[in-house]
Amino acid sequence: MQPNSTPTVRRCRITLKELAESFDMVSNEMTGFLDLEAGEVLFITFETARELEQVYEAMPPGLGNASDEEQREAILAVIKEQEIGVSDEDLILEADAIDRGLGTRYVALPEADSREGYRDMEAFIDTVTDARLQSRLERAIRGRGAFRRFKDELRDADVEVEQRWYAFKQLRQEDRAREWLADEGIELVTE
């Protein structure tokens, strides 16, 4: 008989809405991480990640099993002694904490996928009952600049339609967030 292979469920206190909205902020310039303990999303820019790599390269070898405090002290010493130009020491320390806790305390958010956003617009257009507006929106999403033109058309339309779009988009983002949580084995705690 095989041992119980039930995956461990990790828990986090964050609202689904907050998590879902964070997904749109992740890009090739900024990575997002869910902090399972604090119940918040943290972002690290490409620039901060690059600076952290420079700090790591200048650190003395043998710090692999250093405590958090020892690691913090070593990073600050390298920044000071090596005169490594960093934009913000606190951001470097936060990026290091994320790097050290990746997969346990911190989970990387998926990068935003413009195809999903495009499919959201297509699905929303199918719900528009005004044939003229529906046609304008369909034309707006063709070719480059589709997202901007779509929003421009919504802004020119009835304010109720624009509000309905943002509610529709939010629900779609929350569905993607639920799917990601399930894939990562994370359960939201609501109490």
Image (tube, helix red, strand yellow):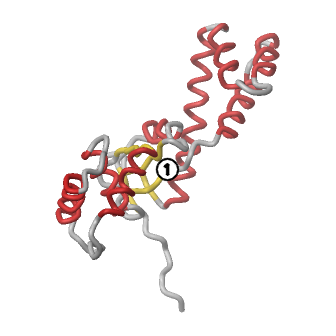
Q: Position of residue 141 (x, y in %)?
A: 76, 24
Q: Nearer the viewer, residue 190 or 168?
A: 168
Among the 4 quarters of the image, the one containing residue 82: bottom left
Q: Is residue 102 above or below residue 1?
A: above
Is 6 on the left-hand or right-hand side of 137? left
Residue shown at 79% from the left, 27% from the top:
143
Q: Nearer the viewer, residue 4 or 165?
A: 165
Q: Look at label 1 and name its amino acid.
A: Leu
Q: Position of residue 154 (x, y in %)?
A: 65, 14
Q: Is residue 164 above or below residue 111?
A: above
Q: Position of residue 106 (x, y in %)?
A: 38, 57
Among the 4 quarters of the image, the one containing residue 149: top right
Q: Nearer the viewer, residue 104 or 66?
A: 66
Is 74 on the left-hand or right-hand side of 187? left
Q: Nearer the viewer, residue 164 or 117?
A: 117
Question: Which residue is labeled 1 in the image?
Answer: 109
Q: How many marks?
A: 1
